[in-house]
Amino acid sequence: MRARQWILAAFAGLLGFAAVALCIVYAMSFRGGVHGVAPVASIGGPFTLVDDTGATVTEKTLAGKPYAMYFGYTFCPDVCPTTLLDLSRWIQKLGPDADKLNYVFVTVDPERDTVQTMHAYLSSFDKHIRGYTGTPAQIAQIAKAYRVYYKKVPTDDGGYTMDHSAIIYLMGPDNNFVTVIPYQEADASAIAKLKNLAALTPTS
Amino acid sequence: MRTLSKLAFAAVLIGLAAPAFAQGANNASITVEQPYARATPAGAKTGAVYMTIDNKSGTADRLTGVSSDVADTLQIHEMKVVNNVMQMREISGGLPIPAGGSVVLKPGSYHVMLIGLKKPLTAGDKFPLTLTFAKAGTISVTVPVQAMGANNMGATPDTGSMGGMGGMGNNNSSGGMGKMEMK
């Protein structure tokens, strides 16, 4: 009898321990996520910008198709052209699925990246990729909505560079956050993510 | 007397030659290998130059300045991605080149940033670049322009593997722009 009570007590203790551990893991999964990216539910939101043809665009423009969104700037000598080149290569690998998605390059440097600058810049990449710019206030709004970090850093010559999140956001057809392609993702997994995203396209 | 004058002449020769030798040794102490730039997107005002700088001497040196007529301003930058945030900083006071060591300027790391490009860099072009070192003086190199995603590492295109080379783009350096249809 006594032995059985001991076993029961031990079992209850183990259960309690497991429950606490689960709670900790659960809590940590909310705090962690992808580095530099806020928790899932809060990514995305309303915005009003202008595309590289001069047309006004909002989150409604993108609704109906999933999309890939990248934030950068044209004065960026390294990461941005590389990422846009990667994205161009992935788009071409998607084949017919490529048209099921929208692809957007949003500038974090609206002072220098005019509609014309964005349009010329994107002519060097896959034609699916559209450029969005706007007023500094509009860019601040979309950056806030997508939890994008960006910061102007002055240089000695009076110019500046921009620190910015180097992540491609993958969003569903209802402007819902799906996942991200982090900086320097391997081709195979990036293409797989884009194919999965294309599969979310509503069939009409 | 004749021996003495010969000796004097020899001394003068050595005296003249010594600075020349020193100069040669200085230039030989720093070598710049495999400089390259990447082609720039249309209308881009900035570009980057990469290279390997070797210091074969026993004393540390610093890359203090870079000049070229392809751009208004040239700066030595360090780029890094921390927690998925791209950060780029100008290196003030020069880039240290350790004694007997080397520093690699490569995508995702150190680069010479070209600011205010006078015209886009096109794959196949070449341009002169002059590097100034605190001790070794100036070294001029010719920089070939490679494809936009070139990493000069001979990475195989389209493998998806970054190969641990910091693989900023998988185009082979010799692949050229023709690998991808650019529109």
Image (cartoon, coloured by chain):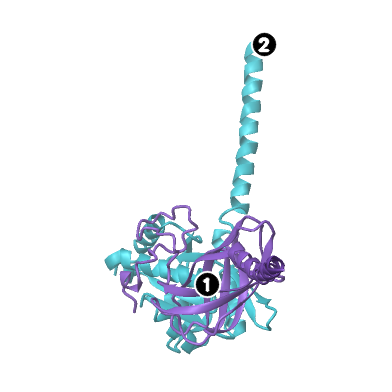
The kind of secondary structure element at disc 1 is strand
Q: Vertically, is B119 above or below B168?
A: below
Q: CA distance from mark 1 to mark 2?
A: 78 Å
Farthest residue, direction left: A96
Crowdedness near tag 2: few (<14), some (14–19) or many (≥20) residues, C-alpha within 10 Å: few
The kind of secondary structure element at disc 2 is helix
Asked if residue B117 lies left or right of residue B91, the reply is: left
Q: Vertically, is B75 above or below A170?
A: below
> Badge 1 is on which residue?
B49
Q: Vertically, is B160 above or below A104?
A: above
Give the residue type that dot 1 points to: Val
**Image quarter of residue A98:** bottom left
Decide which of A49, A13 is in the foreground and name it: A49
Q: Nearer the viewer, mark 1 or mark 2?
A: 1
Colour chain A is painted in: cyan
- Residue A2's disc is 2
- Residue B105's disc is none
Give the residue type that dot 2 points to: Arg
**Image quarter of residue B109:** bottom right
Tell me the residue at 60%/52% (across/down). Answer: A32
Crowdedness near tag 1: few (<14), some (14–19) or many (≥20) residues, C-alpha within 10 Å: many
The quarter of the picture where the N terminus of chain A appears is top right
Q: How far across and down, in percent of the image, does residue A71 sit?
A: 52, 72
Q: Chain of mark 1?
A: B
Decide which of A141, A8 is in the foreground and name it: A141
Q: How far across and down, in percent of the image, does residue A34 sit?
A: 56, 56
Tell me which chain appears purple. Answer: B
Asked if residue B24 lies left or right of residue A62, the reply is: right
Tell me the residue at 64%/58% (across/down). Answer: B57
